[in-house]
Amino acid sequence: MPHCMSAKTILRSSIAQFLFLTKLTAPELRGHGHLSIVTFHRVLPEADRQSYPFPNLVVTPEELDAFLTYFTEHFDCGALATQHKRYLSKEKTLRPLLAITFDDAQHDNYQYARPVLARHHVKASFFIPVVAVERQELLWHDRLGFAVLALLEQTHDGRERLVRILTETGLPVSGTGNLVSNIVGAAKELTLAARLRLVTSLAEASGANQAPEFARLMSFEEIGELAAEGHEIGSHSMTHCMMPECDDRALNYEVAESRRVLQDRLGLPIETFCYPNGNFDARTAHAVAKAGYHRGVTTTWGSNGLEADQFQLRRYDMVAKRVQDSSGKFVPALLAFRMSGFYPGLGS
């Protein structure tokens, strides 16, 4: 959907175009000697994106196609396990290495991302939250998000009930930006028990016990098909918890058990771990290494040099609207700017 551009946005777009034309942000230059990793979450048609609580986590199939067109033109693309091994071996490549990743095992990755990847002849990595797939249960932030939307849509005291539940939980009920995202961000600061109670209370108050069909997760059969086609399957923990809050026993369960289950179910090695919500610390990274993984990925922005900790690899989170003009058209110069290390507030 078209959006108005502020003076700051216009200025940054002009700078991006200048840097792109002078090749100062060219991936072939800025990405040389580094491993870049990009991450996507949901891939949905525009109508479904409008119904999803976190639209910034969504790209449409057309937007994914634009991203991949750019990436395959400027990078040597593939799944993370393959690209990381090539990078560590110091393989000489004509273009810088880039790995493409998808978090959360959403069914739309199978339905919509898979054919786009196939058209571009690109392999990717898909990170699986095991218990959610086994139970076919939405992740907690989706359950919370759909419940909040349902309450806001209720004409009879829905918002009042939402405010009451949030107040009783001790969460703020105002702020700038997307209300649902603000609530999820605040909920991450709660204890695990309090967070789950909040999700349950909101779901019960809203009656949003049945999420839209488009929101479901992949099955293990579909995940197996992705693996058979050459895509990498990695672990996204057992329960998609925030790992630093786990005690040692729970941490071992989230890391080691998820690897064991995935290897047993799929019959292939699981080499990569993706920290849920991007939450990690030295203890959790050590647990990932101890469990036999070869690498771990965070949500910290930036690329990776040879000095990078292989269990704290950085990634670039792909948000479509941040690389589009006011009409919604993909602007390569903006993406190059954001990944260059020159963009204000974004390190590399």
Image (cartoon, rainbow, N blue to C red):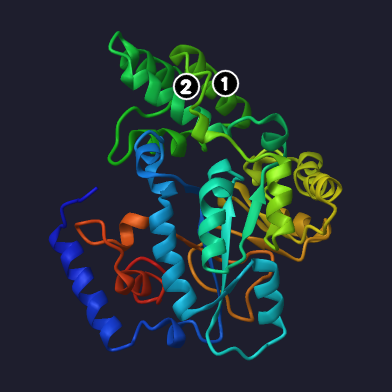
Report the residue at 60% width, 38% height from top.
217
Crowd rating for badge 1 (residues with CA inside 10 Å; few <14, some 14–19, many 20+): few
Above-or-below relation of 4 to 129: below
Q: Could you tell which of marks 1 and 2 lies nearer the N-terminus?
A: 2
Above-or-below relation of 89 to 309: below
User: Which percent across, then down, holds residue 317?
Assistant: 47, 59
Extreme residue in the left direction:
7
Nearest the eye: 233 or 37: 233
Above-or-below relation of 20 to 198: below
User: Which percent across, then down, holds residue 190?
Assistant: 54, 32
Q: Is residue 343 in sight in this rendering?
A: no
Residue placed under numbered mark 1 in the picture: 197
Above-or-below relation of 312 to 96: above
Classify mark 2: helix, strand or loop.
helix
Report the residue at 65% width, 74% height from top.
83
Left or right placement of residue 25 versus residue 147 in this view? left
Indicate the amino acid at tag 2. Thr
Report the residue at 61% width, 45% height from top.
105
User: Which percent across, then down, holds residue 275?
Assistant: 63, 52
Crowd rating for badge 2 (residues with CA inside 10 Å; few <14, some 14–19, many 20+): some
**Do callouts 1 and 2 mark residues in contact (Cβ within 8 Å)?**
yes
Q: Quadrant of residue 145?
A: top left
Indicate the amino acid at tag 1. Arg
Left or right placement of residue 139 versus residue 19 in this view? right
Q: Is residue 244 in sight in this rendering?
A: yes
User: Which percent across, then down, holds residue 48?
Assistant: 40, 37
Residue placed under numbered mark 2 in the picture: 169
Classify mark 1: helix, strand or loop.
helix
Instruction: Please tell me the numbered disc located at residue 260.
Output: none
Report the residue at 64% width, 67% height from top.
79
